[in-house]
Amino acid sequence: MFLSNEEKLNTVVNWLRKSKRVLFITGAGISADSGLPTYRGVGGLYNRGRTEEGYTIEECLSGSMFQRKPEITWKYMLQLGIAVAEHQPNDAHRIIAEWEKRLNDAGGKIVVVTQNIDNYHRAAGSKNVYEFHGSLRILYCTDCSWSEELEPDAAVLTRFKELQTTLPPRCPECRAVIRPRVVLFEESLPRYEIEEFRYEFNNGKGFDLVFSIGTSAMFSYITAPVRTAALQKIPTVEINPVESDLSQYVEIYLPMRAAEALLEIEKRWTTKEL
Ligand SMILES: [Zn+2]
C-alpha cells in the first residue's frame, strides 16, 4: 500500500503516543545533520580513498594498525575527535532526549543504541544510551590503570589539539601509549554493553516501537534488532535519506533527513488533534 509522507508521519505519531518502550538505533546519518563528517569523510580527504600514508581509512583505524603504528591511528582518531568537538548535537539528538524525558514521566522508557562515537546523544541529554563503538571522550592507558574522562565542552577541543602535538600520546604515569575507549576495526564490541542491551531487548519488557535513524548496513549487529523487531511484527520505522538494506524490512520508511523527520513528528505529537 502506498502511503504519502504525511500519512507515514501521522502513523508514526500514533504509534509513539501508544508506546511505552521505544528503541532508537542510530548511525552516522543522525550526526551528519550536525555537519559532522563520517570517518570516511575524514580519510577521504586524500587521493584514491587512501590516506597520505597509503592506507585506507579503515586500515588506519584498525586494531592491528594501532598495535604496529599507533601514531597513524591516533592521527585520524584525533581528526575525528576535533571534528566532533567543533560540531554539536542537532535537533534529532535533542528531540530523542526530550522524548526520553516525556516517556519517562509517563512511566515508559526510551533506549538509544548508537554506532557513533561522538557522544552527542548523551551531550543532548539522553540517559539510556548504549555506545556499541565506544566513545572518544574516555582515554585510558594500554598498560596501567590511568584514565581520563573528557567533559563535552570547549576543553575537549583544547585537549585533542594538545594530544596532536606528540603522536602517539603517552600515559603521564608510565609512558605507555594511551587510547580512547573506542572499538577499532577488527576489534570486538564491548561485551558488557552488548549483553546488557540483549537483556533489555529480549528478557526485559522488549520494545513496542523501533526506530532506525541514519544507519548503514555495514554494521549488521547495529541493524539486527530492527530486523528482529520487524519479524516479530513490532512497528518499525526507518529514517534515512537514502534507502538501505533495512528499508525493505521496516513497516514505515521515511526518506528524510534525521532532524527534519523528527521535527515533523514532534510537531504532530505536540499538536492535540490529529
Ligand atoms: Zn600508564
Image: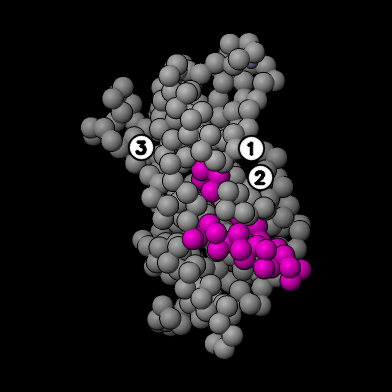
Q: Which residue is mark 3?
A: 42
Foreground pick, 4 / 244: 4
> Disc 3 versus disc 1: distance between alpha carbons?
24 Å
Residue 144, image x and y in percent? 67, 16
Q: What separation in Å lies between label 2 and label 3 (alpha carbons)?
A: 28 Å
Q: Looking at this view, is 247 or 169 the one in front?
A: 169
Q: Position of residue 145 (x, y in %)?
A: 70, 20
| Residue, disc 2 | 194
Q: Residue furthest top?
A: 174
| Quadrant (top left/top right/bottom left/bottom right) for the N terminus | bottom left
Which mark is first along the chain, 1 or 3?
Answer: 3
Asked whether mark 3 lies closer than 8 Å to ligand 1, one says no
Residue positioned 47% across, 40% down in the render? 85
Can residue 217 be spotted in the picture? no
Span colored in magenta: 91-120
Examine the rendered structure and indicate whether residue 114 appears above or below residue 244. above
